[in-house]
Image (spheres, rainbow, N blue to C red):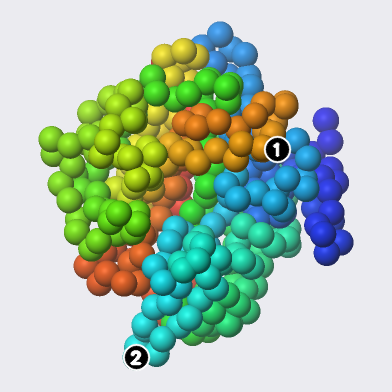
Amino acid sequence: MMRQQLFGKTNSGFPVYSFLLSDTDGISVTVCNYGCRILRLSTPDRNGFSKNIVLGYDQFPLYERDAKYAGAAVGRIANVISNAQFEMDGAVCRLTKNDSPHHLHGGIQSFSNIVWDVLEQSDHRIVFSHRFPGGLDGYPGNLDVKVIYSLPGNGALHIRYEAVSDQKTPVSFTNHSYFNLDADFNREVTDYLVQIEAERYLELSQQALPTGAMMSVDGSIFDFRKPRTLEHIGDSTLQNTRGYDHTFLLSGSGMRQAASAYSPYTGRRIRVYTDLPALQFYTSNFPEEALILNDGVPDRIHNAVCFETQYATDFVHHTSFPGKYLLPGERYSSETIYRFDVV
């Protein structure tokens, strides 16, 4: 099997290649240099049958039109920045309003929407890199970024981010893969057992923006400290977001387990480890009705779960939230691990 193939060309004529990584535990991952996207991720079920468990598209042009950020690296800032501006050291930075009147997932020329260079590649590892010029989408500083995918064994996909800037700038990188542990995007995820290691979450306004309040999960439908299903996803508390689309503030620090999900239908389990302070839990609440996914499957509501490790949503407007400002010359690094097995 070819490990590098031409996947398509962008509207501006840049070639896009796909790359196949695999390990000895039956995990294989196909990524591409457009948005560092994870196109396919195949893992075995309890019967040993390996199938793709991430949302994606068979043809490249759908990725250029994609509004779901399927499988994409996300930055400079993951999630929303309200009113598309923030103040830093007395100066106002005005950002692209790509989710008017707000700024979403780094803007128009974000991590997700450009062709990256490939610095290294092997059967088990690939390193993407790109320089994001100062002023792009309104952000200060030239930002040099690496996104590294590797399959070192033990059924784990490691995603590492490295960056350096020549000016102070806020950063919060993540991956936006949608996981369906049944390998069937016609099936909803309501019977999954989900656990999130968080005692607090960010309260949202009627406009689904953080209010600034960090709420206790105790006694609420946001309490996933013990595994529970998603059968209550239609609760009126989640009406504005049509399901979960909330930031959880993770317990502990350093590399630790942040979340897990288990499908009783196939026995697949995903465990998420990270050194970051927050996690956006999203249940694919806004399907693109005309969108055709891999293998001709139409998109539908609640067909996947996302575990987006990050800094707190809109931290540039809330000084009490955990956030990150990268200083000139400072070397940034973080890592998230998705580990797959069967139970």
Amino acid type for the residue under numbered disc 2: Gly
Pointers 1 and 2 in contact (C-beta within 8 Å): no
Viewer-proximal residue, 64 or 1?
A: 64
| Crowd around label 2: few <14 · some 14–19 · many ≥20 (10 Å) | few
Quadrant of the snapshot with the C terminus: top left
Viewer-proximal residue, 149 or 282?
A: 282
Most extreme residue toward the left is: 219
Please report the residue visible at 42 percent of the width from the left and 41 percent of the height from the top.
282
Percent across and percent down for residue 225 are: 22, 34
Please report the residue visible at 22 percent of the width from the left and 67 percent of the height from the top.
320
Disc 2 element: loop
Left or right: where does residue 57 sit relative to residue 46? right
Please report the residue visible at 30 percent of the width from the left and 27 percent of the height from the top.
232
Quadrant of the snapshot with the N terminus: top right
Viewer-proximal residue, 59 or 195?
A: 59
Left or right: where does residue 180 sit relative to residue 229? right
Percent across and percent down for residue 173 are: 48, 59
| Crowd around label 1: few <14 · some 14–19 · many ≥20 (10 Å) | many
Amino acid type for the residue under numbered disc 1: Tyr
Rendered image quadrant of residue 330 = bottom left
The number of discs equals 2
Q: Give the label on residue 90, or none.
A: 2
Q: Which residue is mark 1?
A: 57
